[in-house]
Image (cartoon, helix red, strand yellow):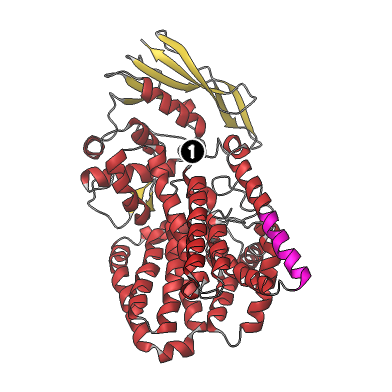
Amino acid sequence: MNISNISAKERRIFILAALGLLCISSFLHFWKIGEVPNGFYPDESSVGYNAWCIAETGADEYGIKFPVFFKCFDNYQDPVYVYALAGFMKIFGPEKWVARLPGGIFHLLASIAFFFLATKYVRNRWICIAGAFVISILPWLFPLSRTGIGGYLPMVMGMTAGWYFIMDAVGRRSMASAVFAGFFWAFTMYSHQIGRPMGAVLLICFVISMNKLILKRMKIFALFSSIYLICMLPMIVYVCNHPESMTKRFSSLSVWRNAGGFYEIMARIIERYLEYFNPFFLFVSGDPILRHHTGESGELYIFMLPFIIAGIYIFYRRFARNPYVRFAVLALVAYPVAAVFTLNHFHSTRSMDGAVVWPIIFIAGMAYIFRRRSEKIFKVGFYSLLIFFIFEAGLYMSNYFGRYVEKSRLEFTAPIVEALEFSFKNMKSGETLYISESAIPQKINTEFKPFWYSSLLFFGKVPPSVYQEQGIPREYICLYQGQSLGKGILIRSNIVSFKDEGGIVRSVQNNEQIPENGTLIRQFPILKGEKAFLELYCIK
């Protein structure tokens, strides 16, 4: 069904259906976005505070004007999410829901871009819109879209739009699409560090699959390449001057780290490559990291499996004669490449191009089964799978907004975040927040670095100009080390944890001295069902 060739009534029905699905998806993305997931990861605080710095001063936390990359945690944050967030920070200020807002917006834009990409593979626009809705609530993407952790969703949006425009440019000899393709592929590279190897691999797959067509469209491809290189120039110049911005993170995660030799490295790479085609990863268990995933489903919905099998069959038949299909198949084969060179297993964010590639195969299979619905077995199977999808998606969302909230508390550092929010809300003018080392999960210095300073800046709403000039103001936020305290609030833990000689974590009662002028006013549970708390004392 081509929407341009249908009646006005059918077009209205299609548009209303599209808007209805967009409303459902938007509600799921933005409902309780400041509360679910519970807590606020330090990366979210860092991104949010740097965006506020840009909005207020035009410089990052270090006072560098409009940087290409943002230095933080002795590492580098990518620019797209920070700059996209800056406008919201200017209007609303540093709030959790504000910091997470762009993630949902980029996910919705990615699903809209996927609708147009799907039209390059499937003629039926109802199938395309169904695919767009599925990708808008896909377990691979949905949890991250409700956080402010980096540029994963901008990367997916750029990748999806770039894929559509580069195929449209070469297929229709469209100069405008070539320009947009160059922009969006560069956008992918700027969005997240993992988008750089992913984008490079996908573009190589495109050239291999479209080589004959590219030769016939050299002007179009040259225009695309020119726009892409022009957009990449700021990054190229920056990386030449600061090579560590490109390599520092990878050097600590590379698969050859602590390897015994070439054969061990190759064994690790092959093992990890095969993991990303493991049905349990894709449809049952997913990424074990709770920041990325709920831990109670696969990266894809189970209902997609029969459609994916049908899609693989269709792509196998069309591989030799259809360059678009060749591109998708090569992209599927290559999708784990960025992930296999890192130590982690089953890492969904380093294989996130799979969240675009697998759904393309899914809609191809869906269209094939729908075309054969005149046969009873295909008709019953098709509609049964759609009913199962409604049940499965409902179950997933029930878990996400239910058990996952409590399950992911520690992953998103909820206890200390709740303590900080309560403290800053209840402190009076001129009072100080004192924080004991026992309250912080990692080792810190007097400036609360390397990680936790960003959370203090964000929740304490320390003006960017103040921090850029003098750091964290000690009269407002101070490390407690047993000294006498003025008026304010003290945060400490009632337990301290350590590793014994066998590497087992032990917890004992915290014998840290409590100030005589301190009164216990609140406790925040660290672990549900255990007597471990963050304690807040009012210092008079």
Relative vertical location of residue 351 with respect to residue 462 in this rendering, above or below: below
Quadrant into which the N terminus falls: bottom right
Residue neighbourhood size for the residue with mark 1, other residues' Cα within 10 Å, grouped as few (<14), some (14–19), many (≥20): some
Quarter of the image where the C terminus is located: top left
Is residue 8 visible in the rendered image? The answer is: yes
**Front position in the image: 482 or 519:** 519
Specify whether 299 is left or right of 146: right
Is 515 rendered above or below residue 217?
above
Highlighted range, magenta: 375-389
Is 266 left, or right, of 524 in this rendering? right
- Tell whether 212 sits left or right of 430: right
Q: Amino acid at mark 1?
A: Lys
Asked whether 78 falls inside the magenta stretch, the response is no
**In the rendered picture of this protein, how many numbered marks are placed on residues?**
1
User: Can residue 436 be seen?
Assistant: no
Residue 38: give x, y in percent of width and height. Answer: 51, 36
Residue 295 locus on image (x, y percent): 64, 46
Residue 388 magenta-drawn? yes
**For the point 44% across and 10% down, which residue is it?**
519
User: SS of the residue at dot 1?
Assistant: loop
User: In the picture shown, does residue 505 fall above or below 488?
Assistant: below
Residue position for label 1: 32
Question: Looking at the image, is 180 positioned above or below residue 488?
Answer: below
Q: Residue at x 63, y 50 (%)?
A: 393
